[in-house]
Amino acid sequence: MEKLATLAVHAGSPEGANAPLTTPIVQSTTFRFESAAAVQEYQRGKSGLYMYSRDENPTVRAAEQAVAQLEGGEDCVLFGSGMGAMTSALMAQLSAGDTAIAATTLYGGTYKLLRDVLSRFGVKSRLAEPEGLVDAIRDGGAKVCVFESPTNPTLRVLDIAAVAKACRAAGVVSLIDSTFAPPLVQRPLQLGVDLVMHSATKYLNGHSDHLCGAIVGSAARVEPIRLLSHKLGASLDAQVAYDLLRGLKTFAVRMERHSSNALAVARWLEEQPAVKRVWYPGLKSHPEHALAARQMNGFGGMVTFSVGTKEGAFRFWDRLKLVARAASLGGTETLTSLPILFSHTGYSPEELRRAGVDEGMVRMSVGLEDAGDLIDDLRQALE
Ligand SMILES: *Cc1c(COP(=O)(O)O)cnc(C)c1O
């Protein structure tokens, strides 16, 4: 197989004599049929024909094949957002009366989807701390286990192979949200996970300019999710699929730079007296550093640190000049957010403690700028 960097540049590109180098944007909602027989051929499936762009579109299909190849899966379905992907993946597996095991460290949107929405349709959720996830799976009775690694914002690293193995033994479908560690950094299907979900809004597209989501896995696991997605309608637009393919061409270079910049920033932060603690899987001080070194390739672009107090964090944050104050991650610009104002707003002190979030915490999505310039900005803001 070609190396990931080569795949990232070429996956999904048109082939054949005199083919365009880049994938054309097929900007049409509908497609002509030659005859009634052609429609019947389409209805039988696997014909390569198109009917309506909510269900399938050639540009979207090319991007799906590219993401599937990068993740090392047989097939992929793309969605109009990461939450569209997660909703479709969970609804395709779960019916009334079924139970999902969810890691307590989940992205807020996924947690609220289970707690506030799927619960209304009779789906039960059982929460487990990262340490207790394998035991919770072994307890049985669940249909799906949804988890993340590394987690937000404390960048805990879970043993993906161990979770996948426990799921397989218990007949539970494993579903990882791998947004924080996309291919090149981490490939969960190789570690035995059934389904990988991405908010492709983040590193895959990589430019903070589009929402998109992905589900990747075996053809047999992806097909029911694709069919349900036609009904739920969180479809990806052809223009966005084109931009995703464009983003993927620089994906490997971007990930290398995100990882090397993040490591440089994390090491520098760790030496600052004003910084109480740094969380980055690439640091030796990280509690799961050895596991991260084993299951990841580079450690990704997310760094979290604490300056100790809320006042200190607010002051530092307001003083940043180059680094942007903004939610989200995975784009070219370095972004910082304060978990207590963003992902964990409204949590009680007890809930914050359980999530491992302290009031002085700052989360950074380290971008592609010069690492020295980033450090200069952090230094002046910390002074
Ligand atoms: C952003 C994000 C999502 C949701 O994705 P959208 O594209 O915003 O819908 C899900 N999981 C994680 C870990 C994320 O960072």
Image (cartoon, helix red, strand yellow):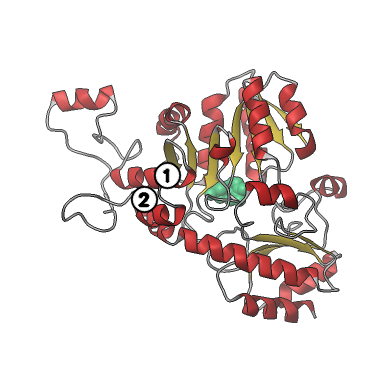
Q: Is residue 31 visible?
A: yes
Type of amino acid at the residue the image marks with label 2: Ala
Q: Is mark 2 within 8 Å of ligand 1?
A: no
Give how far across and how far down residue 285 sits, in percent. Answer: 80, 58
Give how far across and how far down residue 46 sits, in percent. Answer: 29, 28
* 204 is higher (above) or lower (below) than 260: above
Type of amino acid at the residue the image marks with label 1: Gln
Local packing at callout 1 (Cα closer than 10 Å; few below 14, some 14-19, many 20+) is many
* Residue that numbered label 2 is attached to: 11
Q: Residue furthest left?
A: 35
Give how far across and how far down residue 270 sits, in percent. Answer: 79, 68
The structure residue drawn at horizontal position 72% and vertical position 43%, both measured from the top left corner, is 105
Q: Is residue 120 left or right of residue 368?
A: right
Local packing at callout 2 (Cα closer than 10 Å; few below 14, some 14-19, many 20+) is many
Q: Is residue 302 left or right of residue 215?
A: right
Q: In terms of depth relative to the viewer, which is nearer, 254 or 204?
A: 254
* 29 is higher (above) or lower (below) than 93: below
Q: Quadrant of residue 97?
A: top right
Q: In what element is the residue under mark 2?
A: loop
Mark 2 or mark 1, which has the lower sequence index? 2
The structure residue drawn at horizontal position 76% and vertical position 57%, both measured from the top left corner, is 340
Q: Is residue 125 left or right of residue 93?
A: right
Q: In what element is the residue under mark 1?
A: helix
The structure residue drawn at horizontal position 86% and vertical position 50%, both measured from the top left corner, is 349
Q: Are marks 2 and 1 in contact (CB under 8 Å)?
A: yes
Q: Which mark is residue 69?
A: 1
Q: Quadrant of residue 121?
A: top right
